[in-house]
Image (cartoon, rainbow, N blue to C red):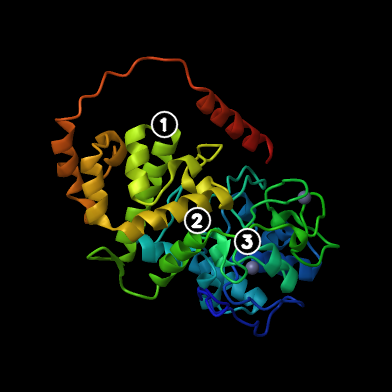
């Protein structure tokens, strides 16, 4: 993968006859909140003061600021900043969400494949990520893809992204930066220069997954075995794979270990995320690990997956979703498992005390809340 690979989500724009004295250009692929924060620092105020001026009745930073902007809100911002309304709207996550779901508006709570900020007032617990090397080499700013859950690595530097300050471990909250800061380059809490953070090499398969998913926004279908999957089908299949990987890693058994080994996944290497939270809340390193395994499974194709599931007599509760349906390309898996289930007698579950793993998982969630 070379430096020429970069997905273009938003073209960016220059200000035209702005009311505000100092308006930075909206950079290519820059996400709306990043530009607003840079805009605030350029005027010599903090982000809350700036948005309070634009939308006095909106508590803009207490919710996810990147999800959507109404036409009316955008037009008001255009009048003050000179950035065209279309460019402002293209810098939100809404066009991507519409392509992925067909729905115009985000739901309350989790939207699959979009990172969750975990907002409590203006505090956050994660959901924004960056590449330290990119921050060092160019003007620090955040990209649209820094909010996408399938992005866990920088394609230019091939390193895993970070979602918190390496020095004080605070989640990134650039909207809390205030003058005399002039750029988004430092941690809001301890002032650490974020570009100096150390980096780890990204798993090549996580990058392959990321590239393939990005391509689906400009290409009609992707191959999975003999199937040609549309964007929505491909994401549904990948999500199902993430689900079974996480379930199997929590409670491995010899038959699931064998099943996954045949699909190119070593379950022993898969560290279950310490918090056990939904995928959209996980750190870049946890998501990179999962997505690299999903890529291995995708490479194997549906026929082999179904054949191995039948041969290893994998328990249906692992592979069949409790709610919703199987991905279309694996629709036959239900029938395959039913036939092997008759031969596979399971003992009734025995009530046991909560496992150490599950207690630790709850403890990690509690710590995460305190770190806001
Ligand atoms: Zn980078
Ligand atoms: Zn810090």
Give the number of the mark in front: 2 or 3: 2
Left or right placement of residue 78 versus residue 18 in this view: left
Mark positioned earlier in the residue sequence (1 or 3): 3
Q: Secondary structure at mark 1?
A: loop
Give the labeled residue for mark 2: 149
Q: Which mark is residue 55?
A: 3
The percent position of residue 52, horizontal first and vertical second, equals: 68, 59
The vertical placement of 311 against 210, above or below, is above
The answer to whether any part of residue 363 appears in the image is yes
Graded by Cα atoms within 10 Å as few (under 14), some (14 to 19) or many (20 or more), the crowding at tag 3 reads few
Q: Secondary structure at mark 2?
A: loop
The percent position of residue 271, horizontal first and vertical second, equals: 52, 41
The answer to whether any part of residue 326 appears in the image is no
Q: CA distance from mark 1 to mark 2?
A: 25 Å
Ligand 1: which quarter? bottom right
Q: Which mark is residue 251?
A: 1
The percent position of residue 24, horizontal first and vertical second, equals: 71, 76
Graded by Cα atoms within 10 Å as few (under 14), some (14 to 19) or many (20 or more), the crowding at tag 1 reads few
Mark positioned earlier in the residue sequence (1 or 2): 2
Graded by Cα atoms within 10 Å as few (under 14), some (14 to 19) or many (20 or more), the crowding at tag 2 reads many
């Amino acid at each position: 993968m070379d430096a020429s690979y970069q997905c273009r989500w938003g073209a960016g724009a220059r200000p035209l006859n702005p009311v505000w004295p100092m308006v930075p250009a909206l950079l290519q692929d820059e996400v709306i909140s990043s530009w607003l924060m840079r805009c605030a620092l350029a005027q010599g105020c903090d982000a809350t003061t700036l948005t309070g001026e634009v939308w006095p009745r909106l508590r803009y930073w207490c919710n996810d600021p990147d999800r959507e902007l109404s036409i009316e809100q955008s037009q008001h911002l255009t009048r003050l900043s000179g950035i065209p309304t279309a460019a402002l709207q293209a810098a939100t996550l809404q066009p991507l969400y519409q392509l992925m779901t067909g729905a115009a508006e985000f739901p309350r709570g989790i939207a699959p494949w979009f990172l969750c900020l975990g907002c409590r007032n203006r505090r956050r617990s994660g959901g924004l990520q960056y590449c330290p090397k990119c921050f060092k080499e160019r003007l620090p700013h955040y990209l649209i893809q820094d909010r996408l859950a399938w992005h866990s690595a920088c394609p230019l530097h091939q390193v895993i992204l970070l979602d918190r300050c390496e020095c004080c471990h605070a989640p990134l909250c650039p909207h809390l930066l205030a003058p005399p800061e002039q750029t988004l380059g430092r941690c809001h809490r301890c002032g650490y220069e974020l570009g100096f953070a150390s980096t780890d090499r990204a798993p090549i398969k996580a990058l392959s997954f990321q590239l393939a998913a990005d391509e689906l926004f400009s290409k009609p279908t992707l191959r999975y075995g003999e199937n040609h999957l549309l964007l929505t089908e491909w994401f549904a299949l990948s999500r199902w794979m993430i689900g079974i990987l996480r379930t199997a890693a929590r409670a491995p058994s010899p038959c699931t270990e064998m099943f996954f080994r045949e699909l190119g996944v070593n379950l022993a290497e898969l560290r279950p995320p310490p918090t056990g939270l939904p995928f959209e809340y996980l750190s870049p390193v946890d998501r990179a690990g999962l997505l690299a395994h999903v890529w291995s499974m995708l490479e194997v194709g549906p026929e082999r997956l179904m054949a191995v599931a039948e041969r290893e007599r994998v328990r249906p509760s692992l592979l069949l979703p409790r709610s919703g349906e199987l991905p279309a390309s694996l629709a036959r898996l239900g029938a395959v498992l039913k036939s092997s289930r008759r031969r596979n007698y399971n003992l009734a579950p025995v009530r046991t005390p909560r496992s150490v793993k599950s207690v630790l998982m709850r403890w990690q969630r509690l710590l995460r809340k305190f770190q806001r």
